Amino acid sequence: MDLQLSGRHVLVTGGSKGIGRACAEAFLAEGAVVSLVARDAAALDEATARLRALHPGARVAGFAANLRDPAAARAALDAAEAAHGPLDVLVNCAGAAKRTPPAELDAQAWHEAMEAKYFAYVHMMDPAVKRMGERRSGAIVNVIGAGGKVANPTHLAGGAANAALMLVTAGLASAYAGRGVRINAINPAQVLTERLRARLDAEARLAASEGRPAPGAPGEKLPMGRPAAPEEIANVAVFLASPRASYVNGAIVAVDGASTPMVV
């Protein structure tokens, strides 16, 4: 199926690794022009070099920025549009809240979670959606996480940030639908990335503090018996961003292998 993304300018935050890098690769495979934004300039250079090697001749560039700073986010967007033209698609993957057992939570941890996840998304989404609205065209996909719907003891602060992002996704989708902009979200559960290893470390600390055995291998208790691969999340992001999903707007799509069997 032709997803009609050839030549479209796609910006992926958190594009240097994990789901973000998988998204960048998937969009390049569809012929898109890709801008990557990440905080670590060295990791960003490594990712862009890898993507160019996989897709010779593809237009891909990296722009280092700390998305906790709204001015830095706007500057990265300006630089990407100067290099590749007006933005057609934004995919937000940057930022992850630290997994913290409940007894270790304090006010700073709650603030840190919002800065790391919620504001890292909002600082790029705010200028991008306004520009898309002015052009009356665009799509945004927020890769959020199942923790915003199902509370996890080691992910309460991060889950609160995820829940807030789901509300922002639905609210902005409604606000900008009449201006030609679609905004959707993906809620993965376990994905085989560096973040999953950090989660397992936090859960092991919690289990030790409660005198329980450490958790088992990643995904062994999930309905499908394994975590998702980053590419499986990227495939959904590419579809939601494409004109083939032209009437999908304000959706929160679970891509979790039935690990959170919910109807709301």
Image: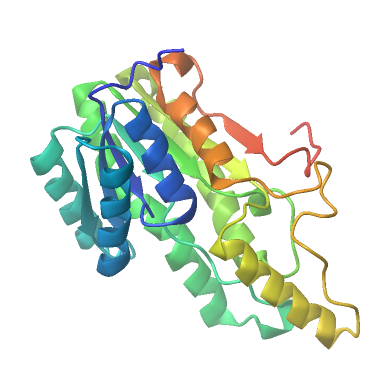
Q: How many marks?
A: 0
Q: Is residue 75 above or below residue 261?
A: below
Looking at the image, which is closer to me, 142 or 228?
Answer: 228
**Does residue 170 appear anywhere in the picture?**
no
Q: Residue furthest left?
A: 82
| Residue occupying image coordinates x 59% and y 34% | 252
Q: Position of residue 122 (x, y in %)?
A: 38, 51
Residue 187 placement: quadrant: top right
**In the image, 181: left or right of 255?**
left
Residue 39, horizontal then vertical, whole percent: 31, 65
The residue at the point 54 percent across, 51 percent down is 164
The image shows residue 135, relative to residue 186, as above or below, that is: above
| Residue 21 seen | yes
Front position in the image: 59 or 190:
59
> Is the image coloured rainbow, by chain, by secondary structure, or in one colour?
rainbow
User: Can you tell which quarter of the image residue 34 is in?
Assistant: top left
- Image x and y of residue 182, in percent: 41, 25
For the C terminus, give its image quadrant.
top right
Q: Is residue 30 above or below residue 20?
A: above
User: Which quarter of the figure has residue 258?
Assistant: top right
Considering every residue shown, the one lying at the far right of the view is: 212
* Residue at the image position 74 percent from the left and 52 percent from the top: 150
Pinpoint residue 95: horizontal percent, then vertical percent: 44, 61
